Image (cartoon, rainbow, N blue to C red):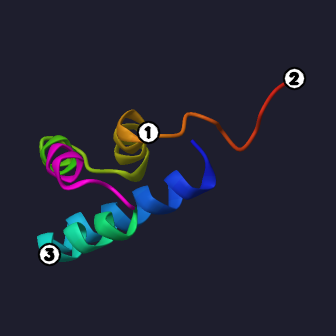
């Protein structure tokens, strides 16, 4: 997981813990996520038993557009 995904996951974890779905949607908008992807992401995150940043990060990566990590191995 790269640094950006880690940041986004931590922020979403905090917003979901607050239960403020408007802030969740607004943050996802700043992430540049299309509305249909936002809805699927919210649905998957809401269905998690334990909403922690590593699980949320994994979900973000599944829907992300870039699969390049910070730490490329040669």
Q: Position of residue 58 (x, y in %)?
A: 41, 38
Q: Quadrant of the N terminus?
A: top right
Q: Position of residue 30 (x, y in %)?
A: 37, 70
Residue range in magenta is 32-40
**Residue beneath disc 2:** 74
Dominant secondary structure (helix, strand or loop) of the stretch shown in magenta: helix
> CA–CA distance between discs 1 and 2?
22 Å
Mark 3 crowd level (few <14, some 14–19, many ≥20, 10 Å Cα): few
Q: Residue at x 46, y 40 (%)?
A: 65
Q: How many marks?
A: 3
Q: Is residue 74 above or below residue 68?
A: above
In magenta segment, residue 38: yes
**Residue beneath disc 1:** 61
> Which quadrant of the figure has residue 47?
top left
In the image, 50 versus 66, the foreground residue is: 66
> CA–CA distance between discs 1 and 3?
22 Å
Q: Residue at x 87, y 23 (%)?
A: 74
**Residue beneath disc 3:** 22
**For this view, does 49 lie left or right of residue 6?**
left
Which label number is shown at residue 1?
none
Q: Earlier in the sequence, mark 2 or mark 3?
A: 3
> CA–CA distance between discs 2 and 3?
42 Å
Secondary structure at badge 3 equals helix
**For this view, does 25 lie left or right of residue 68?**
left
Q: Earlier in the sequence, mark 1 or mark 3?
A: 3
In magenta segment, residue 29: no
């Amino acid at each position: 997981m790269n640094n950006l995904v880690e940041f986004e996951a931590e922020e979403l974890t905090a917003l979901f813990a607050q239960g403020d779905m408007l802030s969740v949607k607004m943050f996802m908008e700043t992430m540049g996520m299309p509305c249909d992807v936002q809805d699927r992401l919210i649905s998957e995150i809401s269905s998690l038993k334990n909403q922690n940043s590593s699980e949320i990060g994994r979900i973000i990566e599944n829907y992300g557009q870039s699969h390049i990590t910070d730490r490329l191995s040669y």
